[in-house]
Structure formats: C-alpha cells, structure tokens
Amino acid sequence: MPRSRNLSLLGAAALAALALGACSDPKGKDASPQAASAPSPHAPTTLTPPPEVGPPVEPHTVGGDGSEIRLSPLSEGDLKAQPLAGELACGFSAEQGSLLLAKGNVGSREPAQGLVKVGDYVERIGAPGGFDGMTGGATFSGQGKIIRIALTGPAIGGGESPPRPATLTYMRADGASLTLPGRWTCGP
C-alpha cells in the first residue's frame, strides 16, 4: 500500500477515535443499561426556558444615506392649511398620533389625496382608486417617497368604521425605509 494512503487511513482512524471519545462518559465510566433506556413517562421533564424578552425595539430607519425618517403627527392646523377633497377618509394612527390622512370619493377613478408630515413639513400624497382603493390598505406616492399601508389583522371592535391593525412603511427615493405598527381606519 502506498505511504500516502496509509497516512490517510491513519488520519481517518484518529478522527474516528476522537469522535468516539467525545461521545463517551466524561468520568470514564460506562453508562448503565437503565440510563440508556427511554425516560419514564411519569418522570418530570425539563423544559428550556423561553428567551428573555427585552423592551420593544424602537422602529428605526433602514438603508439610504443614513439620515433618519421622522414622521410627525398631523395637527388640526396642518389639516386646515391643506384641506383634502373627498367624501370619506382613511387614516393611519400610531403611538405618536395621526400620521397619515387621506380622502377619496366612493366609486371614483380619481386618486385619493392624502397628507403625511415628515419632520416639520406636511407633504401631499396620492393613491389610485379613490376611497374604495384605500379600504384594504393602499400604496401612496408623492415627491421622492412611497408609503405602503398593509393590513395585519381583522377589525378591532364593531361599528361602521372599526380600526384594523396595520403597518405603515415609508420608503424614500434613496432606498431608506421606516416601518411603523399602528391602526388603519376608513369610513365617515
């Protein structure tokens, strides 16, 4: 047998011996046949505790040029300064307050018109399909941005216009994005 083949076999045998040694009883004693059998169905089981849950992670801007996307709540003054036309409205609210408001007409092909406040600036946005195009979530666009509202669960409560859990994802033209959890409410 060639010498290199003998070395390969010797190396394989050494690895196998190490692997078997790692699996043996650390005290050098053989396990009893009873210890190797299946545990009794009446024996207590040990469960791994769940991982510790820390404080909720704050939403933050991902990607882009590194500058933060900061959405601010719309005030009554903002809404009066830039009135929206339309029969019915939809709005996204989060912990910070009302972050997006849009209005549209039922059965209209005209886009719904909305407002969002980025930092201190109120900006106009639009979504196709009027009011009907917004009720199941919507994708709004405006100068240098796309805002997607995605419904994440069934309506909460009853009534004519119950809110639904949703996320708002703000995507900036430079590739930055911010996703916030909240509620989407549509109706009168």
Image (spheres, rainbow, N blue to C red):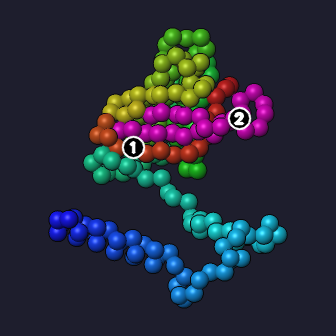
Q: Position of residue 80 (x, y in %)?
A: 52, 32
Whether residue 149 appears in magenta in the rendering, the answer is yes
Q: Quadrant of residue 107?
A: top right
Residue of label 2:
155
For label 1, the SS is strand
Query: Disc 2 marks which amino acid?
Result: Ala
- Residue under the point 78% across and 31% down: 159
- Residue under the point 61% across and 38% down: 152
For label 2, the SS is loop
Q: Nearer the viewer, residue 96 or 51?
A: 51
Image quarter (top left, top right, bottom left or bottom right) of the N terminus: bottom left
The residue range painted magenta reads: 147-172
Q: Residues within 10 Å of mark 1 (few under 14, many from 20)?
A: many
Side of 20 where 65 appears, left or right:
left
Image quarter (top left, top right, bottom left or bottom right) of the C terminus: top right
- Residue ranking furthest to the left: 3
Query: Disc 1 marks which amino acid?
Result: Ser
Q: In the rendered structure, find residue 177 and report the number of the disc placed on it.
A: 1
